[in-house]
Amino acid sequence: MVGRRTAGEKGFFRQVLRFVDAAAPHAGLPADLLEQVRACNAVYQMRFPVRRDDGSIAVVEAYRVQHSHHRTPTKGGVRFSPEADQDEVMALAALMTFKCAVVNVPFGGAKGGVRIDPFAASDGFRERVTRRYAAELLRKNFLGPALDVPAPDYGTGEREMGWIADTYKAMRPDDLAPFACVTGKPLTMHGIPGRREATGRGVYFGIRECLERAEDLKALGLAPGVAGKRVVIQGLGNVGSHAARCLAHEGGAVIVGVAEREGGLFAPDGLDVEAVLRHRAETGSLCGFPGATPVEDPARILELDCDVLVPAALECQITAENAPRVRARIVAEAANGPVDADADAILRARRVLVLPDLYLNAGGVTVSYFEWLKNLSHASFERMNRRLEELHTRKVVAAVERLTGSSLDEASRQELIRGPEEVDFVVSALDETMILAYEQIHREWRSRRLPDLRTAAYAFALRRVGASYLAQGIFP
Ligand code: NAD
């Protein structure tokens, strides 16, 4: 993978701890409590045999790490990657703890990693690996609605989450809410509309919030607003593709560059996002997309001139080596850990604003929280609210018509009184979450005069996690 330093080489967990330690003096936790908050509470490393399509056996290495039990269940995605290792999974689990605290969802952080190549695995092999992984987790009480709830991450999606739910249900037939054991499931398996897009949409909401603060933007030489901003995106998977769609279609941003593993595209007047995604789906590659300049080495995409750079692929993409060449004014961390600690210092010195991962990509876990609530309650948000809201609006419309003496045409009346569907609740609650969390970390940044938003987000999260431990009387 071009431009990528693997987590093992650099110590991704150590990178996360460097960010924690930079924020710790601003969080005010006692030393023993801080030591507990930094540590990974439980690490489960497993190896299991899975039959390949040709009949031979692969011994698969996999992990589940629960970073913090200050709140349960623990929550975090499962990654399929040939580079997944314990260090990477520990780092991602720790990030989940602080991410959940920033957006105030009641989970401890966890993460899973399965060391297979998701792009080479057949459907059958993927299914066998996923089901066996779920069974291994269950055997050790690392899976369940009250224990630990996985979700999609790099290399996994709805299908894998459906297999996990199905395996759990088969092995725990007495569980009243078996579908709450995993989120990001297909709609037909009690998923929630809006989860697929949630992380990318949250990235868009977060960038939009940042681009509304005129005083911060002045220092960057940018005007407020998403519309017209030149955006470059690395990685067009789940997170990157939905972030691209929302930024372009809802925000009016101009996507001037994109990259995937095989190469990149640059078009100063903007790319048609849907056409690019269609081209890749049809041909399996970005290469050959008409009307754009090809970028042979996808790592070079990170160095294009733009207003907002959105790394949405993997960690350790921007390091001390290439950080001096980043020309974006804002780096929006859609992926987990795309900027390492050395690069972070370089970008700060160069006055590049970094929107940190633990805030920016928290939309996924936020909507996962809604899905978990729905699965526990066995009732959709729409069912409980839609009719009531329609009745209320109908009364308001009738009152306004009475007062003004004029009446709406039928089409406009229907449009106005149409009650919210489940996806409307999900999107508005996600929007509210991202707005509130940005206000909180921004206030922390400015009022405490902290060096940057990342330090502010970590300080805020550390205080929240610490308070939760204290509330349980563990640290009297
Ligand atoms: P995904 O597998 O759907 O997509 C990742 C994409 O990145 C793939 O298309 C892959 O080909 C591409 N890629 C890999 N290396 C690349 C490179 N060097 N240059 C360009 N493209 C490259 O994964 P995802 O779910 O979109 O996750 C992406 C990142 O977002 C990860 O860091 C993940 O941890 C993080 N994240 C995901 C979620 C979620 O809900 N899926 C939530 C929070 C954070």
Image (tube, rainbow, N blue to C red):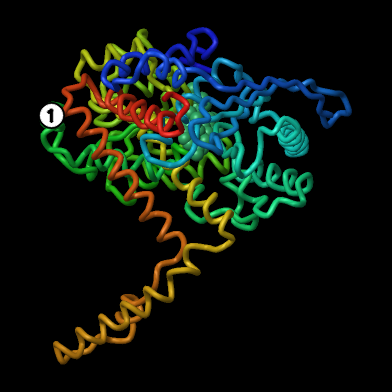
Position of 433 with respect to 128 (left or right) is left
The quadrant holding residue 18 is top left
Residue 395, relative to residue 447: is it above or below? below
Query: Quadrant location of the C terminus?
Result: top left
Q: Within 8 Å: ligand 1 and the Cβ of disc 1?
A: no
Q: Position of residue 170 (x, y in %)?
A: 78, 48
Number of marks: 1
Which residue sits at x=58%, y=36%? 284
Q: Where is residue 325 in the image (x, y as percent from the top left)?
A: 29, 14
Looking at the picture, tell me which residue is in the foreground, 335 or 458. 458
Say what secondary structure mark 1 lies in: loop
Residue 447, relative to residue 14: is it above or below? below
Q: Which amino acid does label 1 sit on?
A: Gly
According to the picture, the residue beneath numbered tag 1 turns out to be 221
Packing grade of label 1 (10 A; few <14, some 14-19, many >=20) is few
Position of 222 with respect to 201 (left or right) is left
The quadrant holding residue 232 is top left
Looking at the picture, tell me which residue is in the foreground, 69 or 137. 69
Position of 104 with respect to 218 (left or right) is right
Looking at the picture, tell me which residue is in the foreground, 42 or 103. 42
> Is residue 205 among the parts visible in the rendering?
yes
Q: Where is residue 298 in the image (x, y as percent from the top left)?
A: 45, 22
> Residue most toward the right?
55
> Is residue 288 among the parts visible in the rendering?
no
Residue 344, relative to residue 401: is it above or below? above
Q: Where is residue 206 in the image (x, y as percent from the top left)?
A: 31, 40
Which residue sits at x=11%, y=31%? 218
